[in-house]
Structure formats: C-alpha cells, structure tokens
Image: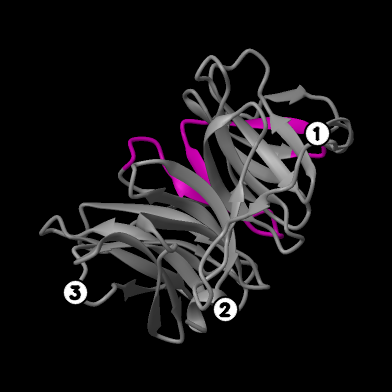
Amino acid sequence: MSYPVRRRMASLAAALLLLGATTAAQISAHPANTPSFRVIEIPGKSQIFARDISNRGAIVGYASDATARQIGFIKLDRFIGEIDFPNSSLTTAWGINDRGEIVGSLVGSGYLLSKGEFTLLPGISPESINDRGDIVGVAAGGRDGFLRTGDGAFTTIRVPNSNSTRAHGINDRGQIVGDFEDVSSHERGFLFWGGEFRTIEVPGSSRTEAIAINNFGQVVGKFVGSDGEQGFLWRAGKFTTISIPGSVTTNIFGINDRGQIVGIYVDTSGNEFAFQSHVKEFLEH
C-alpha cells in the first residue's frame, strides 16, 4: 500500500491576489447569430489547455512557459494563479470542485491539492474530483479507470468485455463518465451509475469520449464524425454538436451546473486556443 506524501506550498488564495492584475479573457469577435465564446489567455504562457470549470466559475488547466515546461493554472475572472509542484518538470491541473480542491498529474504521479497542500497519489492519473472528495481517472498501466473515494478507498473501473477503460469525470451524485475500447477496438463513451454501465455514442461517429458530467446529468466530450473531431453535449439521451465558429476541431473538457463549458479548438490555420462558452449558445443556433 502506498501512503500519501504531503508538501506545503504558498497559499493559493495569496497567489491569486498577487497575480490579480492579469487581464481577463477576451470576447472573440464573431458574426451575428453564431455561438459566442471567450478565448482564455494566460499572460506569458502558450499552448493553453482549459480542463475544468467549477460552479463558482473557477477554471483549471495547464499551459507552457517560455522553457516549454507545463505548469498548472487556476483562473477566476481576472485572477490567475500558478499550480507548480516544487522541483517538478511538469504540473498539470485536470479537475476542480466547489471546495477549491484540485487534482492533476506530475511525472509518474497524480496529486490532490487541498488548502495549499499537495498530497501525492503515485502511479495514477486523476482527472476529476467532486465535492465529496471522490476522485476518478486512469489507473497505472492506462488500461483501467479508477474511483478513489473521499475516505481513500480505491476501486477499479472496467467496462465488461472491453480492452481498456478510462474514467474522466464524476459529479456529486457519484455518476461517472469516461470512454472504453471494445473488443473490435472501437472507442465509445460510457455513463456508470448504480453499478451499471450505459454506452454514450454519437450516431455515425468512429470515436466518442465522454469527459465531464454536471449535477444535472449533462455530459460533454468529443467525437470523430464526418466533419472531423467536434465537441458534444448529451442530455436526456439527446446529442447536440458543439463546434466553435471557424474551427476545424473542438474539444469540450468541462461543464458546470450553470451550463458553462471549457475546452480547446483549432482554427483553419492550425492555431490552438483554450475557450469558455455556454451550452445555450449551441442550443439556440
């Protein structure tokens, strides 16, 4: 059995105040009657990935600095703070709950950041945490998902008769979403709740990944279809495609209870951007 290793870091709240002079995300120009969105910018950083958004609107993700080292970040309105594990060559932030607890990965280990203190989670890749402290992600070896409950109990998640399973998101009800590869090497999404798996697959897609779920059971993710790789919203068994105007690729990684979403998109010139939007923008157009 491995035991958590704890290291102190500066108060994240203090870091947010010190970095509070940074600029807010800019509203992207777009034609009338098309979905609106905001490009997320982190001063001094490139290759920005927005991975999750809490109900309070706090966004976490990671970006590259001038030396191409990946560093995690938290962004709330104009406030931006770095998440950087001491002496690590890489720190990514993947998930955040409404208590401000953050999970992510280092080289060879996952971590939980709570009240300014890191707890190492060796050998696993945590991707999401709910308000009960339950964490899901990918276990060592990359072929199984896992659930680590708030009391530290660990359970493997594997879709029956699958080659591999990955867990990506969990809500406060304990509903878990992810993706699996079946025996024909076809990748599909899933919803796991009450001991039962339900397949989530965009019709006509060659690959579907369910990545995040909010407390209303709305699921977001990405799929590969006739128009390439696009995002999707799944609610009450119905799919809505989410595609940023002018993009060739859209990935949705996070959704909160207000319907706010975050992700990345690639434009026609091959440039990649992190963004924030709202599902209603895509339901109304």
Coloring scheme of the render?
one colour
Q: Position of residue 152 (x, y in %)?
A: 63, 46
Upstream in the sequence, badge 2 or badge 1?
A: 1
Q: Residues within 10 Å of mark 3 (few under 14, many from 20)?
A: few
- The alpha-carbon separation of the residues under discs 2 and 1 comes to 35 Å
Which amino acid, mark 2? Lys
Nearest the viewer among 174 and 264 is 264
- The alpha-carbon separation of the residues under discs 3 and 2 comes to 24 Å
Q: Residues within 10 Å of mark 1 (few under 14, many from 20)?
A: some
212 on left or right of 19: left
The residue wearing badge 2 is 280
The residue wearing badge 1 is 116
Image height of 158 relative to 204, above or below: above
Q: Position of residue 114 (x, y in %)?
A: 76, 40
Q: Position of residue 85 (x, y in %)?
A: 66, 23
* Mark 1: secondary structure: loop
- The alpha-carbon separation of the residues under discs 1 and 3 comes to 45 Å
Residue at (46%, 54%) from the top-left corner?
168
Query: Where is residue 11, by image quadrant?
Result: top right
**Mark number displayed over residue 204:** 3
Residue at (47%, 48%) from the top-left corner?
137
Upstream in the sequence, badge 3 or badge 2?
A: 3
Q: Can residue 155 be seen?
A: no
Residue at (33%, 57%) from the top-left corner?
158
* Mark 3: secondary structure: loop
Q: Can residue 140 be seen?
A: yes
Is residue 182 rendered magenta in the image?
A: no
Residue at (68%, 73%) from the top-left corner?
258
Image height of 91 relative to 126, above or below: above
Which amino acid, mark 1? Gly
